[in-house]
Image: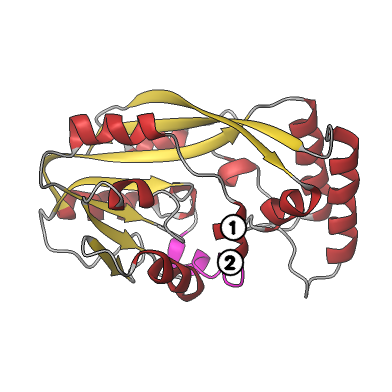
Amino acid sequence: MENIGTNCEKFTGKADVYQKFRPGYPEELYEYLCKYYLPSGGAVADVGAGTGKFAEGFIRRNITTFCVEPNADMARVLKENYGKYPNFRHIPSPAENICLPQGSVDLVTAAQAFHWFDGQAFYACCGKILKENGAVALIWNRRDRDEAEQALYALDMKYCADKFKGRSGGIFNGDQSSLREFFRRGYEELRFENGAFSYTCDEFVGRRLSSSYALKESDAGYVGYVDALKEHFEKYAAFGKYVEHITTYLYLGRV
């Protein structure tokens, strides 16, 4: 895996579109984590927090939430969204060197982010900041691999070949060795239905442009990429809406 120290700028300029178009996470997932891993008065460190899409579920539950986010653009939106909450803290640290005291949190989470980390350095950092018997939860939203998704995958491979390594950095390409290497003591996999998300054409394009690998306006080929996304929408949308069915995957273990 790459080191987030060299990756934290990948989302610069994408914070607003990320916040607007990225899907959230199912309530059942938060309920499960809170019931079994966040005792009353507990604290969570959400690493690679971005704009707070995942952290929001803990913040709303009045849980002390340390949002670890080194990217200034992402952190700007994060603080705009949650800076007013007394249980919110922003930690501008990389995943490999989180500036929190030893034994300060009950749970470490990383949603749509672990594939950017140096897994071994992150492991050591989790061991430092977690309380005894604390756990790490790695989370990804995944779209169903239907015909439309497979066509979209091919489209991204064509237009974003220099940056595109597969969904979630390629972690779901059939090789979960990085998860096994990280969770040395073993881990459990749980799945939560996250429902169907529908997009207009503009929303669909915005969602695609929020990806780290997506071309920016300043990139050669940007106009062709956007046109191809619009053509994809027209082919697979029904009644003006493009629908994606999403399952949330949770990988949970102790370090």
SS at circle 1: helix
- What is the magenta segment's predominant secondary structure? loop
Residue corresponding to mark 2: 16
In the image, residue 14 lies in the stretch drawn in magenta:
yes
Residue 185: % across, % down = 24, 30
Residue 231 sits above or below residue 194 on the image? below
Give the magenta-colored segment's residue range.
3-15
Please report contact status of discs 2 and 1: CB closer than 8 Å, yes or no. yes
Q: Horizontal placement of 78 versus 73: left or right? A: left
Residue type of the residue flagged with mark 2: Asp
Residue corresponding to mark 1: 20
Residue type of the residue flagged with mark 1: Lys
Q: Horizontal placement of 241 versus 46: left or right? A: right
Residue in view at x 21 percent, y 60 percent: 87
Of 103 and 15, the residue lying toward us = 15
Q: Quadrant of residue 132?
A: top left
Of 54 and 86, the residue lying toward us = 86
Q: What mark, if any, has residue 202 been given in the picture?
A: none
